[in-house]
Image (cartoon, rainbow, N blue to C red):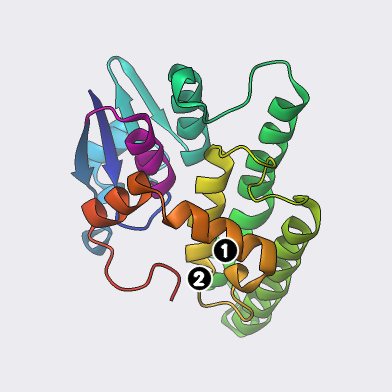
């Protein structure tokens, strides 16, 4: 059984959803961000970065959401959440996962937690505005480059689609919303209709529309 340290709607959502797609048991351990539990001495023993999520898989303790997603996809090939090793599709799978984590996520953090990234309070509005512009640009690139879909990798559902759906939730306060784009919107609609995704939303206690 896996043990997933999570917070509702946080970066743990994608690994949690993948576990549900695979159909294996998971013990969920809620990390209370309201009390900064991710910075507690106990949590830092398993995740020195003090971030969410952390996955315990027997003796393996793994942090970083994308790394956990890759591990789960590789460990459960029967779920077909990643293309076969050595294929062009696998290379594109890596490309998009790295793009999501290296381009979009840093700017999402800057946008939502701007004050953490500067010692100059006067610069906060400008930094936030810059992050907002870049986030829109990053999602425009996705919209223009994922082909005819309906998924990121074409007609095959994968972990990239779950990860992108999670990012769209984080961008729900953006103008325009990520999921308002035609291709991305259709993709997210398909992902949210999956029973494993609905199970994840329910288990995490996420209320109301997922993207509003």
Relative placement, left or right, of 128 versus 92 is: left
> Which is the main secondary structure of the residues drawn in magenta?
helix
Q: Which residue is located at x 67 percent, y 32 percent?
A: 94
Q: Position of residue 25 (x, y in %)?
A: 22, 29
Instruction: Kindly tell me whether residue 127 is visible in this rendering.
Output: yes
Q: Which residue is located at x 44 percent, y 26 percent?
A: 72
Element under label 2?
helix
Instruction: Kindly tell me whether residue 167 is visible in this rendering.
Output: no
Quarter of the image that includes the N terminus: top left
90 or 196: nearer the viewer: 196
Magenta span has 45?
no
Element under label 1?
helix
201 or 80: nearer the viewer: 80
Q: Are marks 2 and 1 in contact (CB under 8 Å)?
A: yes
In this rendering, the answer to whether 151 lies above or below 138 is above
Relative placement, left or right, of 188 versus 143 is: left
Q: Position of residue 115 (x, y in %)?
A: 52, 72
Magenta span has 20?
yes
Mark 2 and mark 1: Cα distance apart in space? 6 Å
Tell me the residue that label 2 is attached to.
Answer: 112
């Amino acid at each position: 059984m896996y043990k997933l340290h999570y917070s509702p709607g946080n970066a743990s959502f994608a690994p949690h959803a993948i576990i549900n797609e695979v159909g294996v048991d998971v013990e969920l351990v809620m990390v209370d961000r309201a009390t900064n539990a991710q910075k507690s001495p106990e949590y830092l023993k398993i995740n020195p970065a003090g971030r969410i999520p952390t996955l315990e898989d027997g003796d393996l303790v793994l942090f970083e959401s994308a790394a956990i997603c890759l591990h789960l996809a590789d460990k459960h090939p029967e779920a077909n959440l990643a293309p076969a090793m050595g294929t062009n599709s696998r290379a594109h799978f890596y490309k998009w996962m790295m793009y999501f984590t290296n381009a979009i996520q840093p700017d999402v953090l800057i946008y939502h937690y701007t004050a953490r990234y500067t010692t100059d309070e006067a610069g906060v509005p400008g930094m936030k505005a810059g992050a907002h512009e870049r986030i829109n640009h990053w999602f425009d690139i996705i919209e223009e480059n994922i082909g005819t879909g309906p998924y990121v990798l074409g007609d095959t559902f994968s972990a990239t689609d779950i990860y992108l759906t999670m990012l769209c939730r984080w961008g729900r306060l953006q103008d325009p919303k990520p999921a308002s784009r035609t291709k991305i919107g259709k993709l997210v609609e398909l992902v949210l209709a999956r029973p494993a995704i609905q199970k994840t939303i329910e288990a995490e206690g996420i209320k109301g529309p997922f993207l509003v």
